[in-house]
Image (tube, grey):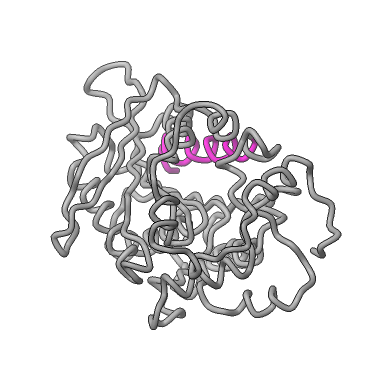
Amino acid sequence: MTSSTWMPWRTKVLDLCTRSGVTAEEMTAKQLSRMRGSVPMRPPYTWVVGRPDPSVTSESRRIRARDGHELKVRIHRPPVSESSEQLPLLLHFHGGGFVIGNVGAYDPYLTTVAAAARVVVVTVAYRMAPEHRAPLAVHDCQDGAVWALEHALDLGVRADSVGVTGDSAGGNLAAGLAQHLRDAGVAGLRHQALVYPAPDLTERELEHLQELDQHYPILTPDMLRSFRSLYLGDADDRDPILSPAHGDLAGLPPALVQTAELDPLRPDGEAYADALRDAGVETRHTMYRGAPHGFINFPGLTAAGYPALEELVGELRHHLHEEPA
């Protein structure tokens, strides 16, 4: 893609509204804190991201991580026909380059998923860089998953029907958790939905992207480099718990990988989908043309947002509700 590549008008609007030229490394602590803060659930914000589904009950709880730190988890539960009905569990991890973002901003998206797919969503507010570097986010997500599985009865979920999902940095964490749960022998793991994921945190793609004459809306190669630097520090970027693309992919559950055409992470997502197929994993990969990074969170300003959401919901319903053959 070059700088002259055609871009849908809605993507151009998003690009203009979000372009700052400032990387995470250049932000002050105050600026980072503001970008991790709560978001208003009122217009014009809701015109872009949508509104939370009113039929879904949402609550926040505090749990203990392995080091004693108090973690926040947010739970979205759709209505059930009777109090004893148990629904599949979907573990979710938000994006933001391991540096910004928060679970509350995903209420419109996740309540829609919970209601349409009829799943209970548990999303984990993992600790972020630069205050908390790798692999702490990975450990927090693992601890959140352990808590949810141990409290399945209380949460009204089926421990024998579990999915993992995340977007961008959260896609990295979800892919890594799928490998972790497989290795831990969690038989109920049935699906992984990776939305424009970042499964490879090495410099492989970045070095190539920096050499090209191109412009990416929303997420630029400079931003990618900044996020990864803040998150990884001196950690080994080829360690599979940080770069799931370098892990063992055999025996993983079926996967949905969604990528965006105008996204510097697209090559990594495509490569991961191919690697999953090569490892014998049932994989569905969809590349949304004209879509920028983050599009599923901006359905009001991207033509791809609602179709991608519909595809994701369909895959979840198929794999988490139907009994395996």
Residue 165, percent across and down? 44, 49
Residue 180, percent across and down? 33, 64
Whether 24 is drawn above or below 309: the answer is below
Question: Between residues 109 and 278, which one lies in front from this camera angle?
Answer: 109
Q: Residue at x 75, y 48 (%)?
A: 290
Q: Is residue 120 visible?
A: yes
Q: Residue at x 18, y 42 (%)?
A: 151
Residue extending farthest left: 68
- The total number of labels drawn is 0
Whether 308 is drawn above or below 235: the answer is above
Question: Between residues 190 and 302, which one lies in front from this camera angle?
Answer: 302
Q: Residue at x 47, y 75 (%)?
A: 229
Question: Between residues 51 and 269, which one lies in front from this camera angle?
Answer: 51
Position of residue 247 in the picture relative to residue 88 (left or right): right
Whether 51 is drawn above or below 160: the answer is above
Position of residue 272 in the picture relative to residue 137 (left or right): right
Position of residue 250 in the picture relative to residue 62 (left or right): right
Q: Is residue 174 visible?
A: no
The quadrant of the image that shows the N terminus is bottom right
Task: Examine the image and state in which quarter residue 272 appears.
Answer: bottom right
Residue 17, percent across and down? 65, 46
Task: Examine the image and state in which quarter residue 48 appears.
Answer: top right
The quadrant of the image that shows the C terminus is top left
Looking at the rendering, the stretch of residues picked out in magenta corresponds to 307-325
Residue extending farthest top: 81
Residue 322, percent across and down? 44, 35
Dominant secondary structure of the residues highlighted in magenta in the image: helix
Q: Residue at x 23, y 35 (%)?
A: 155
